[in-house]
Amino acid sequence: MSGSDVVRDVVRVVVVDDHAVVRAGLVQLLDAASDVSVVGQAADGAEVLGVVATSGPHVVLMDLQMAGVDGVTATRHLVAEHPEVQVLVLTSFSDAERIVGALDAGAVGYLLKDADPADIVEGVRAVHRGESPLDPKAARSLLTARRRPPAVELTPRETEVLALVRAGLANKQIARRLGITDRTVKAHLTSTFARIGVQDRTQAAVWAERHGVGD
């Protein structure tokens, strides 16, 4: 059999986007590829399950920001009901929170809408091959978020005490201001210093000013 006689595996795709113009452009782009066929469209996350049930796609190209049911929620439901279908996110957002949310929901790839059209088509092929394409901007966002120290969560009382430390009050003054004992103030400071990673009141005051505690 000659190479020209080999039947290529056609990737069946459902396109989900709430902007009709964007959706039409994606359909035209994907259908122009000889090995990709758009078998369904949905204007929001609420329509996806019905479209997938009737069209049997291999890949769903999923927008995230949509009115009604968003892409993350739709992905979660889709993966639960149709685990054989691969979800590739295509969105304008590259913040780590959205990326992690989409991947946690079951998406296997994450591309941005400003990607080269050829990269979007190749992303669909890659997902069908079992790969997980990730836009370079999205990857950088994830790496940056992993390097960033986790947010410090102080209790309301710890925040009050730290704000007064920043204001220059001594422990006895803080105790009188808050109606608590000196010992309680010291306990709160010990806990707060450990949480924010400082050794003394001066470092704590600097940390409080830098993070807007007491503003």
Image: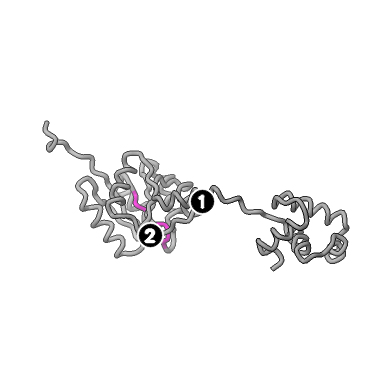
User: Is residue 62 a member of the stretch shown in magenta?
Assistant: yes
Quadrant in which the N terminus appears: top left
- Neighbor class of circle 1 (other Cα within 10 Å; few <14, some 14-19, many 20+) is few
- State the SS at label 1: helix
- In the image, residue 5 sits, relative to residue 209, either above or below, namely above
Q: Above or below — where is 157 with respect to 5?
A: below
Is 167 on the left-hand or right-hand side of 31? right
| Residue positioned most to the front | 202
Res 117 quadrant in image: bottom left
Residue shown at the point (88%, 61%) measured from the top left: 172
Label 2 crowd (10 A; few <14 / some 14-19 / many >=20): many
Is residue 13 something that shows in the picture?
A: yes
The mark found on residue 44 in the picture is 2
Q: Residue furthest bottom?
A: 215
Residue at 48% across, 56% down: 95
CA–CA distance in space, label 2 to label 1: 31 Å
Magenta span of residues = 60-66
User: How far from the left and from the top, in percent, is residue 13?
Assistant: 29, 49
Amino acid type of the residue that numbered disc 1 sits on in the rendered structure: Thr
Residue at numbered disc 1? 144
Q: First in sequence: mark 2 or mark 1?
A: 2
Tell me the quarter of the image containing the C terminus.
bottom right
- Asked whether 35 falls inside the magenta stretch, the response is no
Question: SS at mark 2?
Answer: loop
Depth check, mark 2 against mark 1: the one in front is: 1
User: Which percent across, then down, holds residue 69?
Assistant: 44, 59
